[in-house]
Each structure stands twice: as C-alpha cells, then as structure tokens.
Image (spheres, coloured by chain):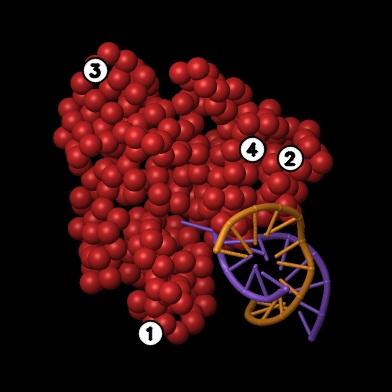
Chain colours: A red, B purple, C orange
Amino acid sequence: MEIIIKENNLLLKNVKDFNLLHIFECGQCFRFNKLDDSSYIGVAKGKVLRISQKDDTVILYDTTESDFYNIWYDFFDFSRDYTLIKNRLDVDPIMHEAIKYGDGIRILNQDLWEMIVSFIISSSNNIPRIKGIIERFSMEFGRPIKYQGETFYAFPTPDELYGLTREDLSVIRAGYRDKYIIDAINKFYEKNLTCDILFKMPTPEAKKALMTILGVGNKVSDCILLFGMNRADSFPIDVWIKRIIEYCYFDNKEQTINTISQFAQNKFSTLGGYAQQYLFFYARENKIGTVNE
DNA sequence: CACCAGGCAAGCC
DNA sequence: GGCTTGCATGGT
C-alpha cells in the first residue's frame, strides 16, 4: 500500500482486500452512510470521515497523515492479512462462494462502548431502524462535530450519559431497550465495568462480564467481542446465520444455537468471526433460506 | 391485519 | 437446567 498526500486528502494506492461497499453494508457498522457519489461518510472515534474507493485506490478526504496512522489504519484493520484469512476459510464450496461474494470485507475495530450500546439496540430489531435510533442517540447526547459546514455528532460517552432517565431516552424511540442502555451507562460510570478491564480479559471471561449488563445475552455479547474487542474467535449467531448454516450444512433442518456454535467452532476455530461476516453478508444479500430465496 | 427485525429477561416447570 | 412469553417500534 502506497500513501500519497494530495491537498487535504490522503490517497491509498494498491490497497488489497478492501471493498468499501462490503465493509459498510455487511452489518457491522451503523454510523456510515453512502452519498450520491458512492463515497461513504460517518463518525467514528470522535471524528468525521468521508472515504471513497475506485478499484484499488482509496481516498480519505480531509484527513491528515497522523490521523491516518493514529486512527484509521487500526479502524480499517489494515495490519491484518485478509488474503491469508480467506485462504484458511476456503474449506468448502459454500465458504468459497461466500468469500468470493463478500470479497473485501474487513472487520472494523470500532469503539467498545459504542458497540455495547449499538448491539443492545440491535436486539430484535432491523438494521435501518437500528441506524435511526443510534443516530438520534448521538444527536441528542453526543458532542457536535463540524465538517464542511455540516454538523455531525460523536457517539456519547458514559460520562456524558450518566443520570439519564428512561423518559430522557424516549426521544430516541429505542422501545424497551432504553432500560438496558441505562444499565450499561450505570455499570460503566460506576467503573464496575470499563473498556480497560474488558480488554484485559480472555474472551470467555470478557463474555461473562459483558453478559452482566442487562440486554446483553449470548448473541449481543458475541457481536461486542467481535466488533469492539477484535475477538475473532466469537461467532455471533443471529436469525440470518442460523438460517444459512441450517440451509447449507444441515439439509435445512432446524438446529439449536449450541449445535451451530459447536459446528462453527470445529469448522472455523479462531477465525469464526471472519467466517461469520462472509456468511452473514452472503445470506442477507441473497436472502438465503427465506421463502423468496 | 398479521408478521418480522443482527434477542433478551423473567417467569414458568 | 430448558422452554415459553412479553416486549417497543416501524416496515412490509
């Protein structure tokens, strides 16, 4: 990868295993949106980023070299060799197809606190509405950031949120999940649970700790581990993953979550998280296992 | 009008 | 322990 500074923009040339559309449409990130020119804009790590791609050239707009190295290099997981991951996961015709279809997916390293709240909101919900709730949440309680004459909002921190009541939260229209968000705020504010504490724990222990938060169960904790803590040994099983695994590997017969979890563990081991993203994207975009499939 | 959406907690047995 | 049910809201 070659880095070129051009006016206020940063050009990355010869970028491998990177597809902006797949990265932002595979359901891992709720705060980036496509513009008319098919670039993406969003807020992460307290900054606004606009980014575009043409073939193997990626442009980060209005970005300094130091922000690239300090923030976006890690955010886009550029240190990881996805060619190696794809080769290791290419173990059967189904995975081969899913990897080919979702080529260029990367698992972003997003803020842990943001992932906790975002995936609490995600439960029994659909992606457009999840994005709406998170956007209102940030707009109401987050710090404003000016960018090109427009105002964006950072994801609010536990300190900024402490003391909010369910009534205060009603403006974001999260439904019954508001009490779960408040429980997460309290646990973080009281330092019973912090990002530092969680990062120091091995995956099974971190999962247990996360599940002490109300509204964080088996699936939500796996998403938090995968998207907020870089724990690719977790394999979140939602309705889509359950459906595609049953459809492709179990003759479309219903299986328990435990069976599917064991199956993924045996098949993908420590790369389960990456396998999950390819399968999720493939299943959703092709409506695998649904009536219209 | 039902039914569903990146599930979960609480209440049963 | 496992199984069932209610849950806010908005889209189809």
Label 1, label 3: how many angstroms apart (C-alpha)?
53 Å
Q: Secondary structure at mark 2?
A: helix
Percent coordinates x, y for residue A12 in the rendering: 23, 29
Looking at the rendered image, the disc whose residue lies closer to the viewer, 1 or 2, is 2
Q: Chain of mark 1?
A: A
Percent coordinates x, y for residue A157 in the rendering: 62, 31
Residue A205 vs C2, above or below: the answer is above
Task: Return the disc, 2 or 3, that comes first in the chain's sequence.
Answer: 3
Q: Please identify the quarter of the rendering in which residue A125 is found.
A: bottom right
Residue A262 vs A226, above or below: the answer is below
Q: Residue placed at 17% from the left, 27% from the top? A: A2
Residue A89 vs A293, above or below: the answer is above
Percent coordinates x, y for residue A77 in the rendering: 33, 39
Name the residue carrying label 1: A251
Q: Secondary structure at mark 3?
A: strand
Q: Is A170 placed left or right of A80 in the picture?
A: right
Name the residue carrying label 3: A5
Q: Residue placed at 72% from the left, 52% from the top? A: A175
Q: Is A209 placed left or right of C6 in the picture?
A: left
> What is the three-letter code of the residue carrying label 2?
Val
Mark 2 touching mark 3, by CB under 8 A?
Answer: no
